[in-house]
Amino acid sequence: MQELSCTTCGNCVLVDKYSPTHTSIQWLTDAEQSCPRFAEQVDAGIRSMWIPTCPSLRASIERAAVDGALRTDALRSEPLPGRLQ
């Protein structure tokens, strides 16, 4: 995962971008405390687990991918190949 800061609020997260449509984000701090968009939603009574994403962070990730600052990994290392029994 790569570190990336939101260009709006400066919050830093870890990001893996596997394809144009698949992005994985790992928050390093509590999203409700560190992201103004999440805080607004929580203040409006929406539980953070129901907030799909921060549009500003999403735009920052997409811009970094387009600019080449965030690499797009062609292959994922997990889950491991196998079959369910």
Image: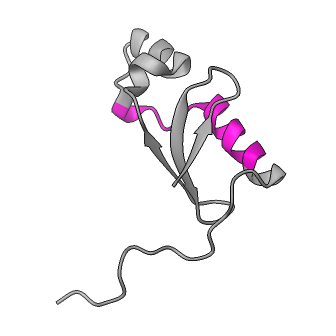
Residue 52, horizontal then vertical, whole percent: 48, 38
Q: In this view, does 72 lie to the left or right of 28?
A: right
Q: Which residue is drawn at 56% across and 77% down?
A: 75
The colour scheme applied to this rendered structure is one colour
* Residue 72 magenta: no
From the top left corner, tell me how far across and down residue 14 is, in percent. Answer: 51, 45
Which quadrant is home to the C terminus?
A: bottom left
Q: Is residue 67 above or below residue 29?
A: below
Q: Which residue is drawn at 62% across and 69% down?
A: 73
Count every numbered label the image shows and give the total.
0
Whether residue 82 sits left or right of residue 22 in the image: it is left
Quarter of the rendering containing residue 36 = top right
Q: In this rendered view, identify the residue nearer to me: 2 or 27.
A: 2
Q: Give the range drawn in magenta.
A: 49-64
Task: Choose between 12 and 74: the one closer to the eye.
Answer: 12
Residue 49 lies left or right of residue 22; in this view the side is: left
Q: Where is residue 26 in the image (x, y as percent from the top left)?
A: 44, 44
Looking at the image, residue 75 lies above or below residue 50 = below
The part of the image, by quadrant, that contains residue 58 is top right
Residue at point 37%, 14% (across, down): 45
Residue occupying the far right of the picture: 67
Q: Is the magenta stretch mostly helix, strand or loop?
A: helix
Above or below, comparing residue 74 to residue 47 in the picture:
below
**Among all residues in the image, which is located at the extreme top?**
43
